[in-house]
Image (cartoon, grey):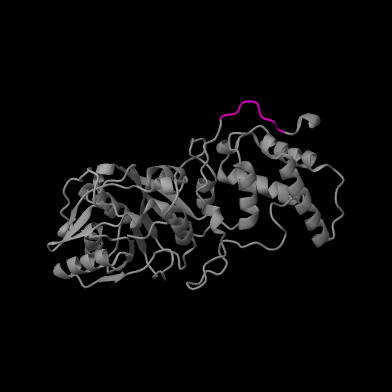
Amino acid sequence: MPPVRGGGTNRQNRHNPLGGGMIKAGGQMPQPNSARGPPPAVNLGGMSLPTNKKHGQHLLKNPGIIDKIMAAADIKPSDTVFEIGPGTGNLTMRLLEAGKRVVAHEIDPRMAAEVKKRAANAGRNNLEVQETDVLRGKWPIFDVCAANLPYQISSPFTFRLLAHRPMFRCAVLMFQKEFAERLIAKVGDKQYGRLAVNVALFVKVTGVCKVAKGSFTPPPEVDSMVVKVVPRDPPIEVDFREWDGLMRICFGRKNKTLRSSFGTKDTTKTLEENYKTWCALTGTKPSKQPMKEVALEVLQTCGLAETRAIKIDLDTFFRLLLEFNKRGIHFSNCSPGAKIGDRMDADAPPQIDPRLFADDHIEEEEEEGDDNGFEDLK
């Protein structure tokens, strides 16, 4: 399995599902042992090896879930499949049957040896296992990606997957259920936020199935969900820094109205500074109209002054960004930004800020009375 960035009890690390159980070679997996004691072990040919918690080793044992993953992946006989964390190979064996070639990244040498032996015993010679950290190793060119990920690397893995070139056909991924729900969230959903909107620039994400804890050995502490990721073709083109600047303001407190979000002193100060920079670069004479008034006019023009970000779809956010830019108001410095489609060759992925996919989920407070900063303009 790929590694888990360890340590601490922060929100990211709380997704680490630790449990107990024993895994036998050949995919036979008895019920987990919940008693405290030595780490759960893998039984390989009579040798008992402890599972490594820091690698997030929770191996999928439910054949019904594997069937659903295979159906969603729709692998063709000519496909190269990229698998992350094959473990003892329960999913890997099915991938080998369906595709032309499987390239697997496995950080645990013991698991790598077991899955290679299992494939060889089955007469499969189309498996390549690389003992590497999936976040640091060189990725192959592939058609389909299949992954049962340690939850702690969900965000950085998603960033690297969406920046990968050449583009793949689809990816079928196992995430912690809470993270997956934020990926597939629609406008108006409680989980709808910056992550869902930013990911939608690149791909369409749909839910495949929910996965209960008991589908794994050892079982995690939380439920999981399988999602399918299909790249947009062509992808949406946007200045990433401009877009992310707008999203950070709108979703900073997603249950506040945009009137409130754009009326804060910090926001108006930043927009004013960016506006002056744009004027200097373009030789435009700065307007004397206060930035609060300009921002409110833009919001009212788009009919969004009293709307909350959680109620706004992708197309409307683009319209809002365009309206601000038409008035010389920008959300980053005014140097050219990276756009989807730039540097599309395999060795040079597009220049995308990984913060675009940061899972910065914050428990939002439901607020009825917003301190919107625009009282003097009513």
366, above or below 278, in the image: above
Q: Which residue does the image show at 33% across and 69% down from the upper left?
A: 131
Lateral position of residue 317 relative to residue 102, left or right: right
Residue 27 can be seen, yes or no: yes
Is 245 magenta? The answer is: no
Taking the view exactly as shown, the residue that stands out farthest to the left is 46
Determine if residue 303 is in view.
Answer: no
Range drawn in magenta: 366-372
Q: Is residue 369 on the magenta stretch? A: yes
Residue 132's place in the image compared with 146, above or below, is: below
Determine the residue located farthest toward the top in the rendered image: 368
Q: Is residue 250 depicted above or below 368 in this figure?
A: below
Q: Quadrant of the N terminus?
A: bottom left
Query: How far across and how far down the image is residue 327, in percent?
Result: 77, 49
- Residue drawn at (46%, 43%), measured in percent from left and top? 182
Residue 123 appears at what percent x and percent y?
15, 70
Which residue is at a point 52% across and 38% down the rendered structure image? 187
Magenta span: helix, strand or loop, mainly?
A: loop
Q: How many marks?
A: 0
Q: Is residue 15 left or right of residue 327?
A: left
* Image position of 169 with respect to 318: above or below: below
Screen quadrant of the C terminus: top right
Foreground pick, 269 / 221:
221
The quarter of the picture where residue 310 lies is top right
Residue 35 horizontal/vertical position (percent): 22, 43
333 displayed left or right of 67: right
Q: Nearer the viewer, residue 190 or 297?
A: 190
